Image (spheres, coloured by chain):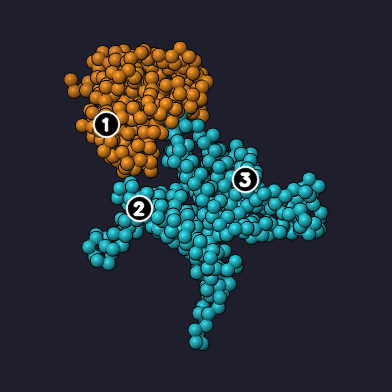
């Protein structure tokens, strides 16, 4: 589905990604974990073309999208649900969702998808005509996810969906991610909350200073000593 | 309030406004204050709404409006001055051979004026729209000034008549003409704002990165907003030329941009109805109601201090400062006029007198109306 080969990104003099190789097979939830500044967000931004790649290639659905611009990448089916939610605060919930379907022209299908998003997040339906800025953090996150789904992604990339949310809401967000995946959308997930992410993902990559240092099925990584000590903070207790 | 009831209210309100215009037309003379201020207000309303499309809805803070209005006004004047009067207008420099026999219909000329303004916007848009916020404002401000100077420069003497300016520009003919043009133009802008494109404009205003991640092409949408705004600015400039009958490059100074900006800010950045209401309020106040500030006033033997020519503008500057400091949302904020909002506001005002309501907040302008 998505294949990164030797992806490199520079921010001025800083070498943020040092040759990342990754593969995302069809129908799976893949997560990307790592500490602050490891290059997780940069990887997503590089995939979708928001930051320039200095070397390497990205292949999606058998097509080379390394040099494509963001608009065409979004049109080909990769959608980023950005970090910190970034909903449009002075637009209504309904308008926010419609912006998500901006690249699509099929009006009837858009209506159906909107109804589907409201089914996933009944809270959003209640708040349909409210300004997005007046929603609570959890509701805004639901809106951000819903907005991304409105673009009919083949691959949904989520940057820290649990950031700043209450534990109960985090749990329900992860349930929704599983449900989205079951409906046929591939998910690439970035998380600080490594345990929750590893529990739901089929495969995971651990990123450290711009390089993949560890990879494997989520269930395996969760018991890996190194992961436990670095990201789950449990090793020393046992 | 039900949708049907609201539609009836809207229709009644529009008919009332129409009837009001007919009454004004029937009862006042050609040169009455009421007539001319109403027409000027309508022109300012179009200028303000077109500026709001860019500044309020797309979040691009442009200060080049007077420049585009000047282009529209000059283009309109050049192609509509009657052939028989051209010798009289261009008596000093002579008229360009190509233009000597050009005399177009006002409606056609209005559209051409808008198109030329839009074309120039397209030309300068590509480099200027790359700039962010303040830099964009400064660049457009500079552009407006360049337009003014180029128009008055000597190489263009046979076209723009240099610093002498142009006169004998055909007037409106009918009292209703400017209102019809303005209503049609604003209706088109409202349709644009409510379309998918309008939603994309607002998304860009709110968060450029998120908008881009949603697949919105920032460059082309900004360009589209800039061109559309300039098109209608050009038309409002042309209407201004018709209204004044004579223009020079000094008719469109930077302060004109600030006047329109004042209207947009008082009405609320991002509210079309706010801009329209504010255009009428500000223009009436400035041209009529606050005129007394410019005249010396003596009560008995006491001469009221400060009142002299120009004091009106001081008061206006103070109003602008107060609005920006304490009432940043303006009359309507980003909301549009709605009957529900009007009912709420009336109830709130009623609550002040009866003391039943809790403390009303002035910033919550939901439905201020003329």
Q: Residue at x 36, y 12 (%)?
A: A25
The residue that mark 1 highlights is A121
Of residues A194 and A93, the one drawn nearer to the viewer in this rendering: A93
Q: Residue at x 63, y 52 (%)?
A: B238
Q: Residue at x 62, y 48 (%)?
A: B107
The residue that mark 3 highlights is B111
The correct choice, above or below, for A36 with respect to A61 in the image is: below
Q: Position of residue B30 (x, y in %)?
A: 60, 66
When asked about the image quadrant of residue B211, the answer is: top left
- Mark closest to the chain's N terminus, 2 or 3: 3
Same chain letter for marks 1 and 3: no
When asked about the image quadrant of residue A153, the answer is: top left
Look at discs 1 and 3 and give the one toward the viewer. Answer: 3
The residue that mark 2 highlights is B339
Q: Is residue B112 visible?
A: yes
Q: Identify the hue of chain A.
A: orange
- Label 1 sits on a secondary structure element that is loop
């Amino acid at each position: 589905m998505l294949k990164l080969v030797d992806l490199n990104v520079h921010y001025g003099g800083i070498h943020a990604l040092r040759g990342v190789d990754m593969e995302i097979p069809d129908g799976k939830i893949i997560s990307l974990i790592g500490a602050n500044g490891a290059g997780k967000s940069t990887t997503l931004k590089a995939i979708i073309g928001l930051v320039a790649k200095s070397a390497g290639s990205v292949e999606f659905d058998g097509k080379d999208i390394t040099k494509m611009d963001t608009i065409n990448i979004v049109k080909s089916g990769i959608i980023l649900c950005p970090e910190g939610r970034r909903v449009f605060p002075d637009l209504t919930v309904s308008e926010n969702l419609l912006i998500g379907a901006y690249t699509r022209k099929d009006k009837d299908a858009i209506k159906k998808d909107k109804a589907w998003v409201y089914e996933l997040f009944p809270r959003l339906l209640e708040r349909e005509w409210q300004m997005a800025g007046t929603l609570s953090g959890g509701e805004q996150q639901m809106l951000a996810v819903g907005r991304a789904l409105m673009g009919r992604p083949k691959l949904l990339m989520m940057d820290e969906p649990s950031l700043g949310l209450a534990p109960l809401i985090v749990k329900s967000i992860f349930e929704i991610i599983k449900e989205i995946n079951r409906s046929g959308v591939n998910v690439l997930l970035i998380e600080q909350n490594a345990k929750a992410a590893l529990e739901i993902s089929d495969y995971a990559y651990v990123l450290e200073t711009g390089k993949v240092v560890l990879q494997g099925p989520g269930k395996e990584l969760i018991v890996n000593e190194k992961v436990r000590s670095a990201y789950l903070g449990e090793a020393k207790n046992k | 309030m039900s949708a049907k009831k609201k539609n009836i209210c809207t229709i009644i309100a529009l008919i009332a406004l129409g009837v009001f215009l007919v009454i004004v037309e029937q009862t006042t003379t050609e040169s009455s204050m009421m007539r001319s201020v109403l027409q000027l207000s309508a022109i300012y309303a179009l200028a303000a709404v077109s500026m709001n499309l860019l500044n309020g809805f797309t979040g691009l803070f442009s200060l080049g409006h007077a420049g585009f209005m000047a282009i529209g006004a000059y283009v309109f004047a050049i192609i509509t001055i009657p052939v028989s009067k051209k010798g009289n207008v261009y008596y000093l420099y002579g008229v360009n051979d190509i233009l000597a026999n050009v005399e177009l219909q006002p409606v056609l000329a209005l559209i051409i004026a808008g198109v030329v303004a839009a074309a120039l916007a397209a030309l300068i848009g590509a480099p200027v729209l790359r700039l962010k916020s303040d830099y964009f404002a400064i660049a457009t401000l500079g552009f407006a000034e360049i337009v003014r100077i180029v128009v008055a420069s000597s190489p263009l003497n046979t076209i723009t008549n240099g610093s002498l300016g142009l006169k004998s520009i055909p007037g409106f003919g009918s009292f209703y003409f400017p209102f019809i043009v303005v209503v049609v133009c604003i209706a088109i802008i409202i349709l644009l704002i409510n379309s998918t494109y309008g939603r994309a404009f607002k998304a860009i205003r709110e968060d450029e990165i998120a908008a881009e991640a949603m697949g919105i092409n920032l460059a082309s949408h900004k360009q589209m907003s800039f061109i559309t705004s300039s098109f209608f600015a050009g038309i409002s400039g042309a209407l201004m030329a018709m209204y004044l009958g004579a223009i020079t490059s000094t008719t469109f100074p930077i302060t004109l941009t600030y006047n329109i900006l004042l209207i947009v800010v008082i009405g609320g950045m991002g509210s079309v109805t706010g801009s329209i209401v504010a255009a009428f309020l500000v223009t009436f106040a400035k041209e009529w109601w606050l005129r007394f500030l410019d005249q010396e006033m003596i009560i008995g033997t006491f001469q009221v201090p400060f009142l002299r020519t120009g004091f009106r503008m001081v008061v206006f500057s103070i109003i602008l400062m107060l609005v920006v400091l304490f009432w940043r949302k303006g009359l309507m904020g980003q909301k549009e006029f709605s009957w529900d909002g009007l009912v709420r506001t009336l109830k709130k005002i009623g609550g002040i007198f009866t003391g039943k309501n809790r403390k009303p907040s002035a910033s919550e302008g939901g439905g201020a109306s003329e």
